[in-house]
């Protein structure tokens, strides 16, 4: 979602206390997928099942 382009966001729900890894992708003009470089990003969801958290602002790597 990008109501404030070029800042994007995507709300997701994950189980409490879950650690997961992710990377961002881009698609070029012809549809080829470009993965960002570097290590996977790692995030742990809050331990409270009702918590809401904003992740840090991530920059393409």
Image (spheres, rainbow, N blue to C red):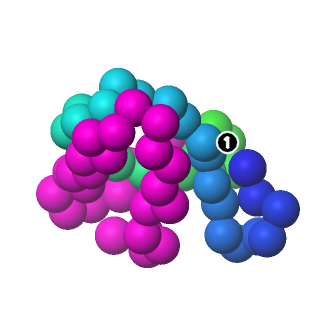
* Residue at image point 70% right, 72% down: 6
Q: Nearer the viewer, residue 22 or 17?
A: 17
Q: Nearer the viewer, residue 60 or 3?
A: 3
Q: Residue 36 magenta-drawn?
A: yes
Q: Is residue 23 above or below residue 57?
A: above
Figure quadrant of residue 49: top left
- Side of 40 relative to 6 (left or right): left
- Side of 15 relative to 58 (left or right): left
Figure quadrant of residue 60: bottom left
Figure quadrant of residue 36: bottom left
Q: In the image as oriented, which residue stretches furthest toward the top?
A: 15
Q: Position of residue 3 (x, y in %)?
A: 83, 62
Q: Residue 49 magenta-drawn?
A: yes
- Magenta span of residues: 32-61
* Residue at image point 24% right, 33% down: 18
Q: Is residue 29 above or below residue 20?
A: below
- Side of 36 relative to 43 (left or right): right
Q: Position of residue 4 (x, y in %)?
A: 79, 70
Q: In the image as oriented, which residue stretches furthest toward the left?
A: 39
- For the question of whether residue 25 can be seen, the reply is no
Secondary structure mostly seen in magenta is: loop
Graded by Cα atoms within 10 Å as few (under 14), some (14 to 19) or many (20 or more), the crowding at tag 1 reads few
Residue that mark 1 sits on: 30
Instruction: Quadrant for the C terminus, please.
Output: bottom left
Q: Position of residue 52 (x, y in %)?
A: 51, 49
Q: Position of residue 45 (x, y in %)?
A: 32, 43
Q: Nearer the viewer, residue 30 or 48?
A: 48
């Amino acid at each position: 979602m990008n109501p404030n382009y070029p800042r994007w966001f995507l709300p997701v729900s994950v189980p409490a206390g879950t650690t997961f890894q992710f990377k961002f992708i881009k698609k070029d003009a012809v549809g080829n997928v470009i993965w960002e470089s570097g290590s996977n990003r790692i995030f742990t969801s809050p331990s409270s099942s009702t918590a809401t958290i904003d992740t840090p602002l991530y920059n393409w790597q």
